[in-house]
Structures are given as structure tokens and as C-alpha cells.
Amino acid sequence: MAITYTISDLAKEFDLTTRAIRFYEDMQLLQPEREGPGGRNRVYSARDRTRLKLTLRAKRLGLSLTEAREIIDSYDSPRDTAPQLKKFLAVLSNHRQQLEQQLAELQANLEEVKTHEREARILLARVDKSK
């Protein structure tokens, strides 16, 4: 018998809310089976658990959920890993470039803040001397 998980199991294991897990389901990252009256109970497979783990890893890398889904879905395709790796590299390269641009903008902003801070200290010193 295959190992299955409830929404509460996954929420506890990954320190998420059940609402977050349902959101990932809405984004088509997870595809639980439905059981019980009216199909109200979600039953997650080991595949869903792995997909959730990969989604959270992609999120930590700063990838969008759409990017995460594209990469994760590529692993469901036939086992020719070259297209999967090419897609993964393209997404990572694009994301790295975005992060480098953001870093450059933050460094420029930080330098501007430091300049204003130095100027404000000089002005404050002048004000203090004139008292």
C-alpha cells in the first residue's frame, strides 16, 4: 500500500498552513486524490510530498511559483534529463541576473544613504558648534 498524507500531515511537516497547501494545489503544484463524503478529504501521495518539498526549495531560491511549476513539471516528463537541466539552467540564469541587478541597485542605494548620513552628521556638528 502506498504511503499517503493528509493536508494536516504536510502542513505540520513543512510548517505551513493548510491554506498555503490549498493555494499550491490551486496553482497546480499538488494534485491530491479526494476521498470521503463529496470528496471533501484530500489525500496526498509521496509524489505530492516531493513536489511540495521542491516547491518550497524553489521559493527559497526566489523563483516564482510559475517557474517552480514549470521546472517540477519537467521532471514528470520522460526521463531524458537534458531538456530538464536546460530548462532549470535557463530559469536559474535568468533569476541570477535579476538578483545581480537588484544587488547593484541596493548597493547604489546604500552608498547614497551613507552619503546623506555623512552630510547630515557634518551639518549637525556645525549646528552644535554654533550654539
Image: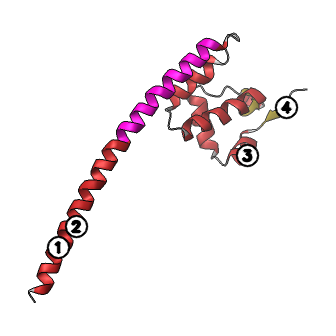
Instruction: Name the amino acid, label 4.
Output: Ile
The residue where tag 3 is placed is 13
Occupied quadrant, residue 14: top right
Counting from the top left corner in percent of width and height, residue 24 is at 59, 33
Regarding mark 4 in the picture, which secondary structure is present there?
loop
Q: Are marks 4 and 2 in contact (CB under 8 Å)?
A: no
Residue 94: say if magenta.
yes
Quadrant of the drawing holding the N terminus: top right
Residue 3 tag number: 4
* 3D distance between C-alphas at marks 1 and 2: 6 Å
Q: Is residue 116 left or right of residue 56?
A: left
Regarding mark 3 in the picture, which secondary structure is present there?
helix
Q: Residues within 10 Å of mark 1 (few under 14, many from 20)?
A: few
Please report whichever mark, 3 or 2, sits nearer to the chain's N-terminal start.
Answer: 3
Quadrant of the drawing holding the C terminus: bottom left
Please report whichever mark, 3 or 1, sits nearer to the chain's N-terminal start.
Answer: 3
Please report whichever mark, 3 or 4, sits nearer to the chain's N-terminal start.
Answer: 4
The residue where tag 1 is placed is 122
Above or below — where is 28 with respect to 76?
below
Task: Single out the mark in the foreground, 3 or 2.
Answer: 2
For the point 53% across and 23% down, the residue is 89
* 3D distance between C-alphas at marks 4 and 2: 62 Å
For the point 62% across and 12% down, the residue is 82
Q: Are marks 1 and 2 in contact (CB under 8 Å)?
A: yes
Counting from the top left corner in percent of width and height, residue 41 is at 74, 34
Regarding mark 2 in the picture, which secondary structure is present there?
helix
Please report whichever mark, 1 or 4, sits nearer to the chain's N-terminal start.
Answer: 4
* 3D distance between C-alphas at marks 3 and 4: 15 Å
Segment colored magenta: 82-102
The residue where tag 2 is placed is 118
